Amino acid sequence: MTVPTRPPRVAVFSLGGTIASTNSPGSSGAGVAPRLGAAELVTAVPQLQAAAQVETVAFRQCPSGDLTLPDLAALAEEITARFADGVSGVVVTQGTDTIEETSFALDLLVDSSRPVVVTGAMRNPTLAGADGPANLLAAVQVAASPRAEGLGTLVVLNDEIHAARFVRKTHTSSPSTFRSVTVGPLGWLVEGRPRIALRPAVLPRITPPANGFPAVALLKTWLGDDGRFLDSVESLGFAGLVVEALGGGHVSAQMATSLEGLARRLPVVLASRTGGGEVLRETYGFRGSERDLLAHGLIPAGFLDGPKARILLSLQLAHKADITAVRAAFEEINR
Ligand code: ASP
């Protein structure tokens, strides 16, 4: 006689966002806001019972733009504690606006090969075709799967499985908003089965910082930018800067002078505003080109886009890394 095996334990942490957003009772004209916790989200999807033994934690309840790096450091500690307690996988539900940043922070902060899967919804529970229940079910199916081990933190929506380090929100309202422009998704789900087509390299881990996070700015440059914002970076108290430059990593000649001055005093990371590929290192030779900026101390973000580079820089500075150590951290992730 075969003894039926119990499905794996999966912990679901809720943080708010559209997936948890409803009208307040009696005021349907005021717009939806995060009101549902993990237990209510899970109860609404009975199919979860076949996929996993689900346990719930209502961790935060906010629009995702209100989440902070201290929240994510605390979440990483709680996830690690659950893994130590025997949980096989973790799902985080939250607002989609910042999933590209939060998932990458968790990727760096959670020291485990077990799956951490972040999900959300584009259509809130009051709308026809709400995608939250399907996304939650898919996320739990991935988190419960041994195939998802060792992939780093994943983002699962619309039956696609993305690596946190590559994924971006690319559309304001489409359920297929999440894209990994440079590599495509790692895999997908079919009939509830996760299929992994690509396995990314293992990322270096960063211990969750115990103390405060220094402020790090993210600036996107534009046609004819004279760089006047740069004059305020230090006086506003920023300890580091990520600049989303044009194309392969270019700024105007005028801006180059200010950027290079800044890079002598604090870490300045060069990313691209294109949202795909990686910054160049050795092609263009004009004033403000990637060669010029890198020769004057800017640190290449590699394949990390601006928001993800800002997460890595923030975590480095929270550990009091100097410019040399920050450079080494970006090199290591791009090895
Ligand atoms: N504003 C919401 C949030 O990020 C959007 C969403 O969840 O899709 O919290």
Image (spheres, grey):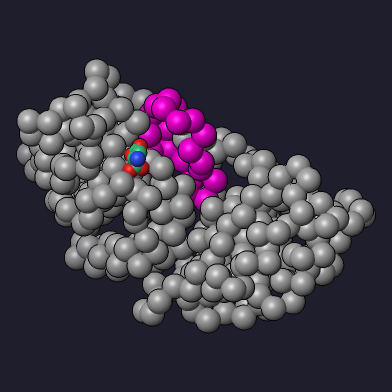
Is residue 182 one of those drawn in magenta?
A: no
- Res 223 → quadrant: top right
Residue 156 falls in which quadrant of the image?
top left
Residues in magenta?
153-176
Residue 68 is at least partly visible in this image: yes
Looking at the rendering, in which quadrant would you find the N terminus?
top left
Residue at 22% x, 42% y: name it.
34
Identified at 19% across, 65% down, the residue is 85
For the residue pair 8 and 56, the one nearer the viewer reads as 56
Tell me how many marks there are. 0
Q: Position of residue 8 (x, y in %)?
A: 20, 48
Coordinates of residue 17 in the picture (x, y in percent): 29, 42
Q: Nearer the viewer, residue 278 or 295?
A: 295
* Left or right: residue 116 compared with residue 269: left
Left or right: where 230 falls relative to 136: right
For image coordinates 22% across by 51% down, the residue present is 61
Check the image and name the residue furthest to the right: 285
In this image, 329 relative to 89: left or right? right
Task: From this view, report whether residue 24 is shown above or below residue 286.
Answer: above
- At x 38% / y 41%, what residue is drawn? 96
